[in-house]
Structure formats: structure tokens, C-alpha cells
Image: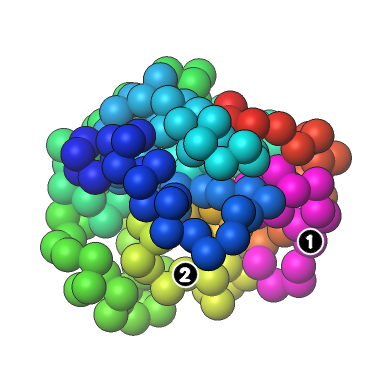
Amino acid sequence: MREIGAPERLTRAADAFATTPDVVSWACSSCSFTRGLDGARAQAGALAAHLGVPASSTSLAYLAALERLGAGRVALASVYHPELTARLSAFLAEAGVETVHAVSAGAGRDRDLATWSPARITGLAEAGAHDDAEAVLLPETALHTTPLLGELEARLGKPVLTATAVTVWDALDRLGAEPVQDGLGTLFSGAAGRRRPSSSSS
């Protein structure tokens, strides 16, 4: 995972873009937090410098979303093995975010995760939820979570932040767009406060 997320590897991949984008995000959860907070910032910084546009990643997007929501305590509904879940918790802690509860599904490959049913995803989210958490995180871009966001928040009674949703929200936010869309939970509801100015990696 550290090799996949090497900044020089990301910039080489960016060279394949047909045109220079207005914003870029490294859309991967695990490969963007296993290097720690400084490593995640280095990934985004390398892309921003290489392309000359604002850059981020899924892990940095989680931090931006939590900051926007004013949430400092989270529960993790993780598909990962416990060791990798612990590394995510450590990444969050570097940014001042406390993990009050975590579950680890110990799942396999991304290809398998993409086949998870809505019921299985919902079960994981419910197992990960905790009364003391201000938000529940589902950190895996392979899960098909977007159609479930509204229902998950209704069930859990708090914001649910999924990897794909925060990545898209953060990219739109960095463009200076208004990331508001019905049915996609609190983060996209417009209730999360004013957007920040578009900037480079954070």
C-alpha cells in the first residue's frame, strides 16, 4: 500500500490525463492514510505541484468533512483487518480526531467488496456506530454506499461519511462549487456550513 501511494507514482499516473483538471484527488482510502498525516499531505502536495491545481485524497477529504461538520469523535465501520483499522485511527488521531469505537470486518479484495449487498453494508455501519460518536466513517471506495447514505443516516441518527462521498464532496468544495445534493446525507445537505476557499493540498 505504501508503494502504491508513493508520491512519484501518483505524479506519473497524473501524466496520463488527457487534459489538466481543475482539481485532482487521490481516490483511495487505505493507500492515502497508511503513510500518516504528513504522508497524505505529501501525496496531495506532489500532485498539486505537478499539475498546478488544488489536490487532495480520500483520507484528507475525511478530515475536511469532519472539520466542516465540527465532528471530533468518530466511530469506524471498517472493512479492513484490525491492524489496518488501527492505522486509520492513528491517522485520525494525528489530526485531532478521536476514534471512540471501531469494528473491523477483515474483508478481502476490492473486487469482493464491490459485491457487498446493501444489507451487508448496513449491518457493518450499524455494528460500527456508537452513541459517543459524532459521525460514523465507512472508509472504503470499493463499497457501493452512495444510494444508502440517506437510509444509513436515518438509521444511525448521525452523519455517515463514506469514502466515495467525502472524496467527491471535497473535490467540489475545492473547486469552489456548492456541493449540495438531496439524498446524500448531512454533508451534501448544505447544513455543513460555508465552503472554504479553493486551495492546494491541506
* Left or right: 73, with 31 as reference point: right
**Is residue 183 positioned above or below 117 on the image?**
above
Q: At numbered mark 1, what does the secondary structure look like: helix, strand or loop? A: loop
In the rendered structure, find residue 4 and report the number of the disc placed on it: none
Q: Tell me which residue sits at (71%, 32%) in the image.
A: 199
> Counting other residues with Cα less than 10 Å from the Cα at mark 1, is it few (<14), some (14-19), or many (20 or more)?
some
Residue indicated by mark 2: 145
Rendered-image quadrant of the N terminus: top left
Span colored in magenta: 169-184
Image coordinates for residue 151, horizontal then vertical, percent: 58, 72
Query: Image point 35% across, 34% down: which residue?
Result: 7
Between discs 1 and 2, the one toward the N terminus: 2
Residue 180, label in figure: 1
- Does residue 189 show up? no
Q: Residue at x 66, y 62 (%)?
A: 185
Query: Residue 201, located in which quarter of the rendered image?
Result: top right
Q: In the displayed structure, would residue 10 be above or below residue 169?
A: above
Q: What's the colour scheme?
A: rainbow
